[in-house]
Image: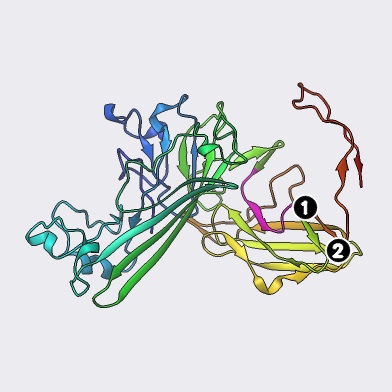
Amino acid sequence: MRGVKGVEGDPNYRQWFNFDSRPKHPQESNTHVGPAYRSGDITWMLDNTLDPTNSAMTNYFSLYDTKGDFAADLKNRLSLRDSLDLDNTGLPFISTTNHLTSTGSPINPFFELKDSDDHWAYYYAASERPGVSVREHIGVQSSRNNYWRFSDTYNYQLGNGPQGDSINDFKFIFGGGVYRKPLIDDNYYLGYASTWIHLPDNDPIGGRVMPPFQGASGGPSGGPIFSLFGKEIDIFFHPLGVRPGSILEVGDKAAFSGHVVPNLDSEVSIEVTTPSGLRKYVKGQANKFGYFYLPITNFNVEEPGPYAVNISVTHRGMTSSGAVEAPYPSGGILGEDTNSYQFYVVKSASKEARIENILPSKLRNSETLNFSLST
């Protein structure tokens, strides 16, 4: 399962490109950009008011044939207008029947009899910013109503301001594909994951789709994912489960999971230090879409107090442009301290702290917030 090469108005252009370099067509002044062609790649985009040629993101996917038998299976099922370039651009997710080549029947295969020789194809699309739901749908081919612009307020969900996306915001672009042959019970289930980044206005390169790691795997360089606190970030871990600042009670289970960005099968190493100095380790490899969780490493927290967590991620394997070479890309989490955070464990009888002083409703520029706590 893959995204698209190029953009909606020119979907067979290139898998990696700068938006300024692609052919310009008059009708494409407001082009929607599809997911990066390969899982693990990164799409960087500007606000639509700065660059109307890539003004919106949309999700639609294609089937890619790695062995050749899939193309042979479809050869007699598609009309002449449908592409069979499963080695290069891919085939849109469409449901096919033998009727299409002979009678041009418009009947959707979902409504045919169960014993008919229909093939069903559809995909699940989900674009998510951590804490904010962006777009989800189930569809075939492309969809006119699945795009979004980056000033979207996303229905004012908690954690999203009225300006929409901000500089360095990132989104996970997920896809799940299904191709079913009910009559013979032969099914394909496919997956996809890439990353989207919101660029600052003064970015020197502009909108682009590139492999990760600044050319470390032999492909073209799209630059770092972004810069944060003066540091270039090429890879990071987004914690789930026990997160920075989480509060647990004695006896609770601590579970560490998260997503690696870029969405690749990178190595994850987590060291947890208890208040008394004991150390616990969570180590392993993310799945091919960058998700990491090892249930066997869960443990119960028995000591109250602050727990220190140290996280590092390293990628030593493949990308869409080949295997990375040493020095291998490595990183931690996002923040001023890029490798560590704390979470806290309290007793069940602990009282909640209260803020004693009255806090202002709005801070002035450079104003310091002072407050005191009492129990």
Amino acid marked by disc 1: Ser
The image shows residue 262, relative to residue 282, as above or below, that is above
Q: Which mark is residue 12?
A: none
| Residue shown at 26% from the left, 57% from the top | 94
Q: Position of residue 180 (x, y in %)?
A: 30, 69
- Left/right placement of residue 23 relative to residue 329 reads left
Residue to which mark 2 is pinned: 274
| Residue shown at 71% from the left, 63% from the top | 269
What is the magenta range? 233-244
Residue to which mark 1 is pinned: 340
- Left/right placement of residue 327 relative to residue 101 reads right
The image shows residue 368, relative to residue 225, as above or below, that is above
Q: Position of residue 68 (x, y in %)?
A: 28, 68
Tell me whether circle 1 and circle 2 mark residues in contact (CB < 8 Å): no
- Left/right placement of residue 186 relative to residue 331 reads left
Q: Residue extending furthest bottom?
A: 184
The image shows residue 135, relative to residue 289, as above or below, that is above
Front residue (pair 247, 23): 247
Q: Kindly state the secondary structure of the residue where label 2 is placed.
A: loop
Q: Kindly state the secondary structure of the residue where label 1 is placed.
A: strand
The image shows residue 273, relative to residue 220, as above or below, that is below
Q: Which quadrant of the rendered structure holds the N terminus? A: bottom left
Q: Position of residue 287 (x, y in %)?
A: 55, 65
Examine the structure image and report whether residue 266 is included in the region drawn in magenta: no
